[in-house]
Amino acid sequence: MSSTKTAKKKAGPFPQKVDLQDGNLMAAISALHIDYDVVGYYPITPSTQVAEGLDAMKAQGLHNITMIPGDGEHGAAGICFGATAGGARVFNVTSANGLLFAMEQLPVQAGSRFPMVLDIATRSVSGPLDIKGDHSDIMMALNTGWIMLMAKDPQMVYDLNVIAVKLGEHPDVRLPVIVAYDGFFTSHQKRRVHYFEDPQVVRDWVGVKVQENHALDPNNPVTIGPYMNEPDLINNKKQLSIAMENAYRILPGLYKEYGKMSGRDYSMLESYRMEDAETALFVMNSAYDTARIAVDQLREKGEKVGLVMPTVIRPFPKNEITSVFKRTKSLLVGDRADSYGAWNGNMAMEVKAALKDDEENATKVLSRIYGLGGRDFYVEDALEMFEDALDTARTGKVQVPFDYHGPNPGKSDVKMERVVDPLTKERTSPGLLKLEEKEEKVLLKGFNKRKLADMPKRILPGHGACPGCGIFPSLNTFLKGIEGNIVTLFHTGCAMVVTTGYPFSSHRTTYIHNLFQNGAATMSGLVEAYHTLVKRGRLPGDEDFTFIMVTGDGGHDIGQGPSIGAAVRGHKMILLEYDNEAYMNTGTQLSFTTPLGHQTSTSGVGPGGQGKAFHHKDTAQIMAACHIPYVFTAVESQPRDMIRKAAIAQKKAGEDGFVFGKILSICPLGWRTVEKDSVDIIQKSVDCCFFPLYEVDKGITTITYDPEEKGKKIPTFEWLKTMGKTRHLVKEENADIVEEFQKEVDRRWLRLKAMHNDPLL
């Protein structure tokens, strides 16, 4: 945390610090002050900094909250459910598709009546992929049974997180709570904030969690999540509805109680200059402060306008809505998400429903969709919205009930122009590579570096990768061994993001994107569609595609299950994983492939931690256990070996079925290395046997580069000291971590050698 100073005592009785912080760190500070028992999390932009902040605090010894990195947002939600089932006080944070991936768990959490807090840094839902802020994610969670509080700025993020705990755990409520704030607007923008000097003030106010029924009481065994049929389910949901009604009744009192303690008063609806307003604007979160300027400008011109923002949308503040718009002639409701085909945004529908129940209310309501995909909301936008509402007030008629504000639909007659010609099968099949069986080994003949260099690249220069990125040298080298037509599918990750910034693409062959958790399944469908359409005569059978799926940046943590499914089914495709040992595309958080002791932004170094606390996942061996035709590992420092394995992979995928390859790919930014040393560092990882080079052909393991036989084997320490992310391991006090790391590398290497020497292993 940044340096702070003691603020002058405000209305509250407890000293507070004044600071300049963003919403994500304020969420982390609130979690620190609440002192949760368990945090289950998974990194996703733009919410990741919350977990990073908590991890940094833990590394510095500021808390002892148990932090559990999930294998995906669905897994993180399951971790949280399990912890709350044990009576723990639990916190999580996510965004966008992460929320959707976890969505299945949300009704389970609410239906079981286990309180917890989930922060959402709101973000546009894919696809196509967009990482900027709007409300399309939280609108999908409206009907999950969670209370939903709305924070317009970093100060509210802190305050509402504290209030959320006490509200959700109230004995008449017992529901999980979402605190939503705008991604990149509130999550990353710094504002002046206050928070309590002594965290004990917060802990005393929220109290100790009391959970009557939990899984850790041997004297009171309980069944959690029973099979429930009609009429019991409707009774359960009625109880949940009553709990939400109780939250509606209790929340205003908690706002007042917290206001006395903090000096910051909140209400169900925040309003501005609504005392005599005849025309009003209804927006949520960060747009509110911008729209206030528009209100002031219009007031100076004599227009009676006002502004309203809810601090809670579940339970929906129905009575407050009918009260505040009692005398308005016109109202424009701005939604940062569309409910497609409903001719209204979600909030517009709910505001209209609330006003409809008031027989005396004659307010004309307009619905506008704005700010999608992080589109900025300026004072001019608010003024334009007000003008639409003012026109309705003047004429008494709603000219355009529903519309989008600010889009540019483009011109239907514009045609996309081809920038480069498609690669023909002939251009990508020079016949340079020939596989030859000799002495039970597959050899590569015709390897000519000069001619291989002349082969056209499938991925063009001009992408946005960081200098020294190892992804593209590795991918382009691998693709030298692949002849003919290819279709590639990329998981979300650095390689995807930097090559496909609309309207440009670095891919010269057909490219598909899908999210981490479903790439292998998507490619499976495409592969089988191709073979089916060829059989039915709807596609020519002489094109003969090679299907390659690319994953990386930790994406094979979430995607491991679907990959195993595709492997077991045996689809004719290649799955290629570039392993850069972290979630690089979201900012270097720990992945399951991050090695023991390595520093990332969620495995910090300090008095409370010395890097990642557990060993790395061996994806190649996991996939080999699926008994697929071919598994291999490769590195850019051994290009001939990589190209040979690529050629074998293409042959195996075309004839026998599913193939898996793993490439160790350096990330100078995340590994904290100098670009010119990349090849040497990668080779050291091979020479110390951390990343051994081998192949598994129909169950037979062969080491393809043995540093012991070549007299080049080095201790892992020699590799670790080359990287900034492991520089702390050079210190004598961390010798035990290096020793444990060396033992595990040796164990895996000896096991691999045993498999190499015995075809039955």
Image: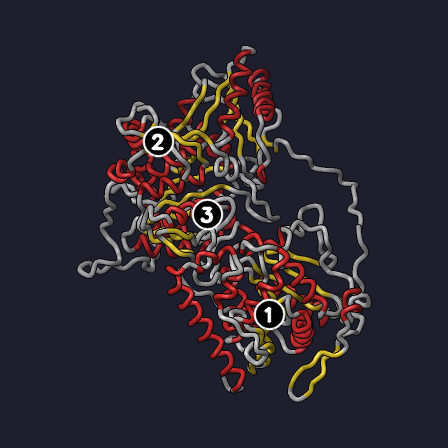
The residues bearing labels 3 and 1 have C-alpha atoms spaced at a distance of: 31 Å
418 relative to 327 in the view: left or right = right
599 relative to 367 in the view: left or right = left
The residues bearing labels 2 and 1 have C-alpha atoms spaced at a distance of: 52 Å
- Res 242 seen here: no
Looking at the image, is mark 3 or mark 2 earlier in the sequence? 2
**Foreground tag (2 vs 1):** 2
Q: Position of residue 212 (x, y in %)?
A: 22, 50
Amino acid type, mark 3 = Thr
Mark 2 — residue?
A: 17
Q: Identify the residue at image location x=71%, y=65%.
A: 486
Q: For the image shown, how many numbered marks are present on the structure?
A: 3
The residues bearing labels 3 and 2 have C-alpha atoms spaced at a distance of: 27 Å
Which residue reaches farthest bottom? 439
Whether residue 710 is situated above or below residue 237 in the rendered picture: below
Amino acid type, mark 2 = Lys
Rendered image: mark on residue 447: none
Mark 1 — residue?
A: 661
In the foreground, 625 or 683? 683
**Foreground tag (3 vs 2):** 2
Q: Mark 3: give few (<14), some (14-19) or many (20+) Cα within 10 Å.
A: many
Mark 3 — residue?
A: 94
Amino acid type, mark 1 = Gly
Looking at the image, is mark 2 or mark 1 earlier in the sequence? 2
- Res 710 seen here: yes
Looking at the image, is mark 3 or mark 1 earlier in the sequence? 3
Q: Position of residue 8 (x, y in %)?
A: 33, 24
Q: Position of residue 21 (x, y in %)?
A: 44, 35
Determine contact: label 2, label 1, CB under 8 Å.
no
Which residue reaches farthest front? 732
Q: Mark 1: give few (<14), some (14-19) or many (20+) Cα within 10 Å.
A: many
Q: Position of residue 107 (x, y in %)?
A: 39, 50
